[in-house]
Image: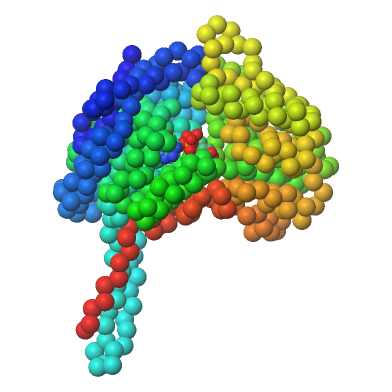
Amino acid sequence: MQTFQHFINGQFVASASGKLFDKRSPLDNTRLGQVAEGGQAEVNAAVAAAQAALHGPWGRMPTDQRVAMLHAVADGITRRFDDFVAAEEADTGQPHHVIAHAFVPRGAANFKIFADIVKNVPAESFVMDTPDGAGALNYAIRRPKGVIGVISPWNAPLLLMTWKVGPALACGNTVVVKPSEETPASATLLGEVMNAVGVPPGVYNVVHGFGPDAAGEQLTRHDDVDAITFTGETRTGTAIMKAAADGIRDVSFELGGKNAGIVFADCDFDAAVEGIFRSAFMNTGQVCLGTERVYVERPLFERFVAALKRRCEAVKYGRPGDAGSNYGPLISQEHRRKVLSYYAKAVAEGANVVTGGGVPDLPGLLAEGAWVQPTIWTGLPETAAVVREEIFGPCCHIRPFDSEDEVVVLANANRYGLSTTIWTENLKRAHRMAAAVAVGITWVNSWFLRDLRTPFGGSKQSGIGREGGVHSLEFYTDLRNVCIKL
Ligand code: NAD
Ligand code: 6OD
């Protein structure tokens, strides 16, 4: 049985308190290992190590060398690909193809893309007139912001953590990561890669533990943390923003979503069914960009609901390595209780349960896991809790609509604004719709198709700021102007 230790100043260390907590398998609730429970002592040590590295070898390293080192980290992840896949499969229980094809490759890509970007961004400059006629030259320089606190969730642990760590390090910062308590494995493994490729101690630090009144909150309140990048629930974002306000620490937030999928009658029907199925049920619906509200143009409604129902009823429950298995459990028993409470609410609010709505009947040990059925509802008003609130489970409500104007109002009538997926063969309509929906990311005839150079983030209560490509530089660097009198 494995013990996941903190990674501080290049070393794997236990908690000063000796405290550990259990990591259980979502597949069958067996104990997978124990995790060191960090607190103020570990946060202090990790932040001190990160500050020292910032003012030491990492801070002095020429950009070329830093960029080469981050490429080496990416190659190190690729070399240990199978270990990362195994770590994420154990932590999340998700199907092998999702982890091996969608999530772990992004761990490497997140380092490469930002290493390349920092080498290729031009600086702005302005030549100005002065009264003496000699003039002056202004130019902007980007400097690292300092020590970045990275607080990440459990739903795609390596992808989401490295999406922050990659650009932070590329810009010359150092990091202290507080991964989700549910998924300690890949952040720990990344420490081994950092050491193997010679990243100086203190550049990448990991403190395991919980959020409120614990390591997470202590990191957000630490005086020597210069900025905080957070991915997780909107409610947690509110708490972190309050904590960060005390030190005027900058924040970048990727938060919750209640995303709409919009299917027009002129769509490629099979592609739309498959696309909406993926967006609602991949990773057992635990994707912030996932679709939980589906709007289908009326002529297609009945046929679409029937096709999506068939697709849901064909999922194969199983362990990541089981032949043909393509559907995993929720992350934990606690999260299952939350999702099942929404399944009950939907019924109480008068939903027509098209499929699912409960717990599958699984054999042997799997019966102890955090499984729920993929679920579709129809017939609810937009005021129903399951239509308004983020559930973060494998479920969606489907409603018919009659016009573009109507569906825009429906899609936008939510406090979140993360993503939308639109299915139509009419290009003019696609452009009109993309401009009208109030979200950070719109996909047309696709979903979760990611070009890492593009701005990524949420509108309304789905986030603050944009990361991706050069936009990440806005957050991870301090942009300063230099004015030289000629
Ligand atoms: P969460 O907010 O419960 O936890 C995320 C992280 O924050 C964990 O590491 C947790 O320990 C820590 N944390 C909790 N309370 C804290 C506090 N007061 N101070 C500091 N740290 C604290 O989220 P989750 O359940 O792990 O993830 C699911 C949520 O994340 C969903 O709402 C989902 O939509 C969102 N999410 C958003 C994006 C995006 O890109 N917008 C991506 C993935 C997940
Ligand atoms: O692709 C990304 O960069 C990203 N941040 C994805 C978020 C997925 C949410 O579950």
Q: Residue at x 43, y 24 (%)?
A: 91
Give residue 324's position: percent from left, percent from top: 56, 18
Q: Which of 96 and 365 lies nearest the eye of the viewer?
A: 365
Q: Residue at x 15, y 49 (%)?
A: 56
Which residue: 27% across, 59% down? 143
> Can you say which quadrant of the picture contains the N terminus?
top left
Q: Is residue 104 visible?
A: no
Q: Is residue 94 above or below residue 51?
A: above
The total of numbered circles placed on residues is: 0
Work out whether 467 lies above or below 181: below
Where does residue 478 sit, x and y in percent of width and height?
Answer: 32, 60
Look at 18% across and 51% down and name the residue there.
55
Counting from the top left corner in percent of width and height, residue 448 is at 55, 42
- Left or right of 480: which side holds 93? right
In this view, the residue in front, 49 or 397, is 49
The quadrant where residue 360 appears = top right
> Among all residues in the image, which is located at the extreme top?
364
Determine the image quadrant of residue 314. Answer: top right
Q: Quadrant of residue 84?
A: top left
Instruction: Relative to 475, say whether 423 is above or below.
Output: above
Question: Which percent across, then down, holds residue 141?
Answer: 28, 65
Q: Name the colouring of the figure.
A: rainbow
| Residue 285 visible here | yes
